[in-house]
Amino acid sequence: MTEIRRPPGGLVSALDPLMRRTNGVWVAWGSGNADRDVADRNGHVAVPPEDPSYVLRRVWLDESEVEGYYQGFANSALWPLCHMFAQHFEPRSDDWEKYRLVNERFAHAVAEEAGDSSDPVIWIQDYHLALVSATVRELVPGALIHQFWHIPFPPPDIFQLMPGGMGVALLRGMLGNDLLEFQTDRAARNFLACVDELIPDARIDLDKQQVQSGGRMTTVRAFPISIDVKHYESLAEESSAAKLASTLRERYTKKGRQLAISVDRVDYTKGILERLRALDLMWARHRELRECLVFIIVATPSRSALTVYKQLEEQVVEQVERINAKYRTKGWTPIVLIPENVNADRLAAIYRAADLCIVSSLQDGMNLVAKEFVACQVDERGLLLLSRFAGAAEEIEGATLINPFNIDGLAEGLKSALAVPLAERRARMARMRYDLHGATIFDWLRSILTAANELRPQRPTGVRSIKV
Ligand code: GDG
């Protein structure tokens, strides 16, 4: 039997609705036992299976490629470096070699899909493919190429931890794009500063946010990603979600207790252990707050093949067990851990039921959970505590900003949050919901396509797009 799995990451959540609307070709790595069975000779799969509306072109990777390219260079070197976690940064030359080769293969697959079209629009997604645009430009000279970088970009002092040749090759690869899209101005500025330090022939115009190098120009700008707001709202409004939300409230908000939630892939960038330390400190310091709050933590395993991620999963379980053992009373368990992927309907009900949602990322490109929470708060009772180091903090007005490195401050911030009156919560949530409706994933897409269009006004874009 073939089981269809939808990975939990923000990238897929964000792009699937867009692909359905644009009928493009999505070139993506193929994995899972059944992937080859459902693809045709050319690696093409029509998706979604129940209502095919676009084509996936698979690039097959063997085990050693997955290890070196994906777990290795992408997730053990680029990911930690971009999030400024020098302690997890492991650049290895074998991994880099695999990363280069796999990027090369993606570039050739894209060129094949472009076929004889003289001016295709090619949109590359994320940090796994930093070298693709430069190669595609050689293979398809007439293409309009742009790339969205979903994660932060570090300042030069951090970026220069990357061994010289690799760092320069990455920057040159990214400069193969006509338009390079980041989540925030800060990330765009950091990228320009790195180019300024490391690419001697580059000329940067900071006002226009453009780089001239190798005889061509790259525009570098911020386009904060969002979500399909109506989709999340309608999930939360479903009668089954409403029912589950009231069941959760009946179970957990007895005796005037508040229900707090968090939802993350288990990743050291998300500040899950810091959040647990703050809760522990708050309950240790303020006895009166015991039994006042139940915390549901959805912690979805992710990248478990990497030791640092597997260890973090174990640490989260250990810490939750420790805190529960320390404070539990007869009728109260402080933390409910859901250490697995929950389905989207259940997630919407959890968002809806909450009085408080905490996003405590130590660094985060955007953080879609913050926006999903706002969209699903159809009863407008919840408060959002949001890390100032998530891109979302630069966008959402009405959240309470927190510094998750400051455990002490976070514990006190949690205490204050519990005391915010309902009327103020409602006013803030109503404001956030209003703003979110004005900045959805479709607005994000439109603004990117408009900016790309402006770079080549004589040729319309978005007619047939190819995504990597
Ligand atoms: C990267 C950047 C940027 C999580 N657990 C479950 C589940 N999820 C979904 C959430 C959300 C997504 O995963 C996580 O998105 P985030 O944005 O929070 O984070 P990353 O995965 O790190 O995404 C990030 C994003 O790309 C988009 O550009 O915002 O900064 O790091 O959609 O709902 N979904 C379900 N069950 C779970 O258990 N159904």
Image: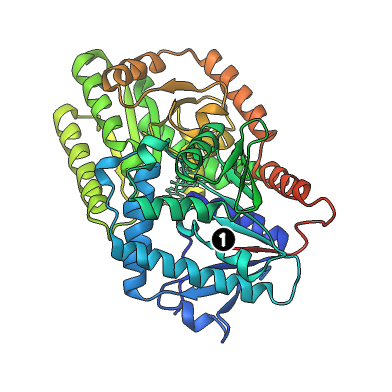
Tell me the kind of residue under disc 1: Ala
**Quadrant of the rendering where the N terminus is positioned:** bottom left
Residue at 29% over, 65% down: 94
Ligand 1 contact, mark 1 (Cβ < 8 Å): no
Q: Toward the viewer: 219 or 5?
A: 219
Query: How many residues crowd mark 1 within 10 Å: few (<14), some (14–19), many (20+)?
Result: some
Question: Is residue 463 shown left or right of residue 402?
Answer: right
* Residue identifier under label 1: 134
**Quadrant of the rendering where the C terminus is positioned:** bottom right
Residue at 65% over, 74% down: 113
Whether residue 430 is visible to the viewer of this picture, yes or no, is yes
Give the quarter of the image for residue 464: bottom right
Secondary structure beneath label 1: helix
> In the image as oriented, which residue stretches furthest toward the bottom?
41
Q: Toward the viewer: 35 or 355?
A: 35
Q: Toward the viewer: 78 or 309?
A: 78
Residue at 60% over, 66% down: 136
Image location of residue 15, percent across then percent down: 59, 54
> In the image as oriented, which residue stretches furthest toward the right?
458
Image location of residue 397, percent across then percent down: 57, 22
Image location of residue 256, percent across then percent down: 38, 20
Image location of residue 448, percent across then percent down: 69, 46
Give the quarter of the image for residue 50: bottom right
Question: Is residue 459 shown left or right of residue 173?
Answer: right
Whether residue 329 is visible to the viewer of this picture, yes or no, is no
300 above or below 95?
above
Protein image colouring: rainbow
